[in-house]
Image (cartoon, rainbow, N blue to C red):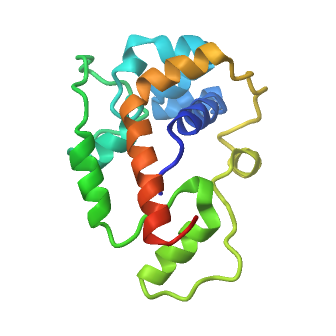
Amino acid sequence: MLRNPVDRLVSLYRFQKSHRDDVIEKEGLRLARLARNHSMRDFFTLEEIQNHPSINNAMTRMLSERVPSWRWESKREDLEVLPLPDLEVAFKNLEKMRAFGLMERYESSVKHLFGSLGLPIPDEIPRKMVMEIIVDEDPGLYRVEQEPLTNEVIQIIEQLTDIDSQLYAKAESLFCKRYEIH
């Protein structure tokens, strides 16, 4: 499942920021600590965040190269500037998949994913990984006031997801063509 890259990173920030202090310390959740200590704008301008493979063009990286085996929320020891991921390799790998989906087309994506796997399509597909739900169900999280999304923050995130945005546009076009959605 792919997601609009800007929406994905805004959601990631809000999720990280919602972790309780005791969980952050116990689990060593570096990204959560950074989110708790920084505004959204400042978080996404940190060098560590700008060069984090799970943030900087992460969807394209996941489809084009080997994913690091360390826990992604933890502190990274290597802060070298990341090379750009290969958009063409990522898209070719996406094209080879039997099925994929788009979060923004959740219902039809799930139907196509289930259908391609030969599984019966469920009548209802509950959304479980939604912030409004998980903060009430997970004792390690709590509700935080949502910071407004400014144009400046959107521009910063767009720089972090420029290749992901290109991949997403291609994926959306392929999804519509593959599943004859207009």
Seen from the viewer's position, the closer of residues 107 and 48 is 107
Q: Give percent across and percent down for residue 166.
A: 39, 39
Task: Judge from the rendering whether residue 101 lies leftward or rightward of residue 134; answer left or right.
Answer: left
Of 56 and 173, nearer the camera is: 173
Whether residue 78 is situated above or below residue 84 in the rendered picture: above
Q: In this view, does 59 lie to the left or right of 23?
A: left
- Which residue is found at the position 54% from the left and 27% from the top? 32
Image coords of residue 84 (percent x, y): 25, 28
- Foreground residue, 94 or 131? 94
Is residue 42 among what the camera can see? yes
Picture residue at 59% right of the left edge, 17% below the top = 153
Quarter of the image for residue 165 reads top left
Q: In this view, does 149 lie above or below 60?
A: above
Q: In which quarter of the image is residue 107?
A: bottom right
Give the answer, above or below, for where 41 lies relative to 19: above
Residue 69 in sight in this render: no
Residue most extreme to the front: 182
Q: How many marks?
A: 0
Residue at screen point 48% across, 83% down: 115
